[in-house]
Structure formats: structure tokens, C-alpha cells
Amino acid sequence: MAIAILDGAEAFLPDCVEITILGIPSAFYQALFPDHVIKYTHPLIAR
């Protein structure tokens, strides 16, 4: 797993922070973000 935290305060807004996490197992991602999984697996239905 890899984690990156980018501070965008100088380029964007003072409170702008981006967090990227790579390598989350599918089952764990599905448990944390069930709505995202539905939108990605059924893009036309979820809109």
C-alpha cells in the first residue's frame, strides 16, 4: 500500500489537501465506500 499527502495551499486554496491511497484491497474498499462501488459498477443507473 502507498499513501501520499499533497498540500495544495500555495497552488489552490489555503485548506486544500489531497490524500491518495493506492493498494486498498477490493473487499476493504467496498466496505468503506459502497456508494462509490455502485456508481462505478453501474454508471448509468446511479445517476
Image (tube, grey):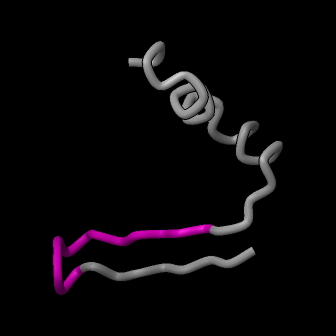
Expressed as whole percent of the image width and height from the top left, the position of residue 40 reads 54, 34
Q: Nearer the viewer, residue 16 or 44?
A: 44
The image quarter containing residue 27 is top right
- Rendered residue at 73%/38% (across/down): 30
For the C terminus, the quadrant is top left
Q: Is residue 16 left or right of residue 41?
A: left
Expressed as whole percent of the image width and height from the top left, the position of residue 2 reads 68, 78
The extreme top residue here reads 45
SS assignment for the magenta stretch, majority:
loop
Expressed as whole percent of the image width and height from the top left, the position of residue 3 reads 62, 77
What segment carries the magenta color?
9-21
Asked if 16 appears above or below 32 in the picture, the reply is below
Q: Is residue 27 magenta?
A: no
Q: Is residue 18 left or right of residue 42?
A: left
- Rendered residue at 75%/74% (across/down): 1
The extreme bottom residue here reads 10
Asked if 38 appears above or below 5 in the picture, the reply is above
- Rendered residue at 65%/68% (across/down): 22
Expressed as whole percent of the image width and height from the top left, the position of residue 33 reads 63, 38
Q: Is residue 24 left or right of residue 5?
A: right
- Rendered residue at 47%/25% (across/down): 43
Q: Is residue 14 magenta?
A: yes
